[in-house]
Amino acid sequence: MSLDTQFTEKIEELTLADEDVPLVHELDLDKIPAGRISKLWVVLFEDALKPMTVPVIIAKGIIISGVISDEGYRPGPVVGMTSSLHGDEVNGVRVIHRLFQTELDPESLHGTVVAVIVANIQGFLAGTRGMDGQDLNRLMPGYTLHSSI
């Protein structure tokens, strides 16, 4: 099988229609199947119109050697990554997709990789850096009386 064919198959594996991607209210990694890549929409909150969700991709590894749980999964570290915390910085979206399409093999992975593809949906859709005219870097870590500067 050529490298182009393998790459195309990986892209097709990650490409799902929205109705095929589950909507969850909490991210429970114990419910994610091992040995594959899973896509989810995670609900952050709900208002009167519709839920505010973020897209998440998870690669949960399975390794045959060593200590195996009842599910056939060897627990390991969990690595999290995000992109587009600033809605106008979109390079990370492609980096995460490329990582999951070409670099991660859940069958040889020890542990779990969780990626929130777009962490700031509203900023991403508006193409803005922050919220209400403020840079998100200046709103974290969230001091009670002032920003982080």
Image (spheres, rainbow, N blue to C red):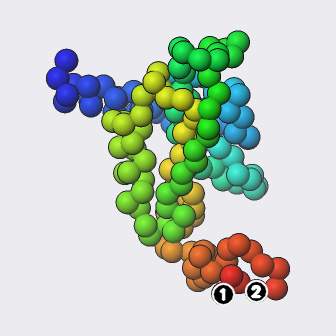
Where does the image place residue 79, in percent across and percent down from the top left?
57, 44
Would residue 34 be found to the left or right of residue 98 on screen? right
Can you say whether 84 is above or below 60 in the image? Answer: below
Can you say whether 64 is above or below 3 in the image? Answer: above
Residue shown at 73%/41% (left/top)? 25
Q: Residue furthest front?
A: 66
What is the number of the mark on residue 35? none
- Residue 103, by quadrant, is top left
* Image quadrant in which the N terminus is located: top left
Residue shown at 54%/39% (left/top)? 113
Question: Distance between the Cα atoms at labels 2 and 1?
Answer: 8 Å
Q: Name the residue under label 1.
A: 149
Residue shown at 38%/51% (left/top)? 95
> What is the total number of numbered labels drawn onto the structure image?
2
Can you say whether 118 is above or below 5 in the image? Answer: below
Where does the image place residue 13, in percent across and percent down from the top left?
39, 27
- Residue 28, by quadrant, is top right
Disc 1: CA contacts within 10 A as few (<14), some (14-19) or many (>=20) = few
Where does the image place residue 93, in percent across and percent down from the top left?
42, 53
> For this rendering, which residue is in front, 38 or 133?
38
What is the number of the mark on residue 146? 2
Where does the image place residue 27, in percent across and percent down from the top left?
70, 39
Tag 2–tag 1 contact (CB < 8 Å): yes
Residue type pointed to by label 1: Ile
> For this rendering, which residue is in front, 17 or 33?
33
Q: Can residue 28 be seen in this view?
A: yes
Residue type pointed to by label 2: His
Element under disc 2: loop
Q: Which of marks 2 and 1 is in front?
A: 1
Element under disc 1: loop
Q: Can residue 126 be seen in this view?
A: no
